[in-house]
Image (cartoon, rainbow, N blue to C red):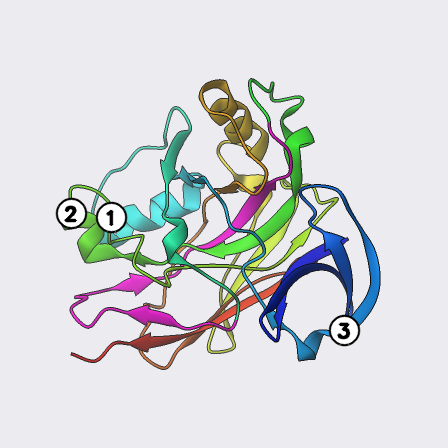
Amino acid sequence: MKFGRFEQQGRIFYGIVEDDQVSELDGTPFDSHKASGRRHALSALKILVPCTPSNFYCAGLNYAAHIEWGNKRKGTNTKLPEKADVGYRSPNALIATGETIIIPADSPGPVQYEGELVAVIGRQARNLSEADALSCVLGYTLGNDLSERTWQKTDRTLWRAKNCDTWKPMGPFIATGLDPMNLTVSVRVNGETAAEYSTGKMLFSCQHFISKISQYMTLHPGDVIWLGTDNATEPDLKHGDAVEIAQKDIGVLRNPVVRAQT
């Protein structure tokens, strides 16, 4: 099943996506809901970010090939992590598929994509074991963790390197019933495949991250956990590009890129 969040003439609602049709719901996937009987053509609706998280978690350095690529590009010697690291992103940076990524005019670059699988929490949870971790997940969506590499190196925190307005595209839909450790995520830039990887290559599993976070913080419906990216994140993005993150069950998250004028 695929859930989407939509807007029509100023009215926001959730629906179930079936090919090119949307069956509108009364309620949301995060609480009680039922079919309303109203159906819409998908093309007649504005697709919104599939949820508005109160907490936005992210996995740090969760794929070996991505670390190896970074070492070659930067001449560094970053080791594989011995434990899972959890970071944060700003919900203020979220945009939906079709909306524009804006590179600030003073960004020295490079600005790069990071296509990621995203776990969407469906119920409140605390102190979950890894065996039970996926019981709190509603489903999975896609994210693009835009990153400004100069700022990432020079700022003490990642406040702007990762969190500029528009730098966290997420969507298009939330797909249920998927195995987060057996999916293929693809990245296309201007229609050309730039990267493709299997989520089975995570250094630390989706279950591990959920369990670890829940030992210290309560997970709430609508919270999201971005699970990292693999391989190179090239080519560098520039004005006029279009970047797509795709997975066959979830759909395609597509966003044009624009550099702001001075």
Q: Which mark is residue 155?
A: 2
Residue interval drawn in magenta: 98-124
The quadrant in which residue 186 appears is: bottom right
Q: CA distance from mark 2 to mark 1?
A: 8 Å
Q: Residue 224's spot in the image, x, y percent? A: 52, 43
User: Mark 2–mark 1 contact, CB under 8 Å?
Assistant: yes
Q: CA distance from mark 3 to mark 1?
A: 39 Å
User: Image point 66% across, 21% down: which residue?
Assistant: 131
Secondary structure type for disc 1: loop
Magenta segment includes 253: no
The quadrant in which residue 38 appears is: bottom right
Q: The disc labelled 2 sits on which kind of residue?
A: Asp
Given the current orientation, which residue lies at the most extreme right position?
37
Describe residue 233's horizontal placement relative to residue 184 as left or right. left
| Quarter of the image that includes the C terminus | bottom left
Q: Earlier in the sequence, mark 3 or mark 1?
A: 3
Secondary structure type for disc 2: loop
Depth check, mark 2 against mark 1: the one in front is 1
Q: Earlier in the sequence, mark 3 or mark 2?
A: 3
User: Mark 3–mark 1 contact, CB under 8 Å?
Assistant: no
Q: The disc labelled 3 sits on which kind of residue?
A: His
User: Mark 3–mark 2 contact, CB under 8 Å?
Assistant: no
Magenta segment includes 115: yes
The residue carrying mark 3 is 40
Q: The disc labelled 1 sits on which kind of residue?
A: Trp
In this rendered view, identify the residue nearer to me: 2 or 72. Answer: 2
Depth check, mark 3 against mark 1: the one in front is 3
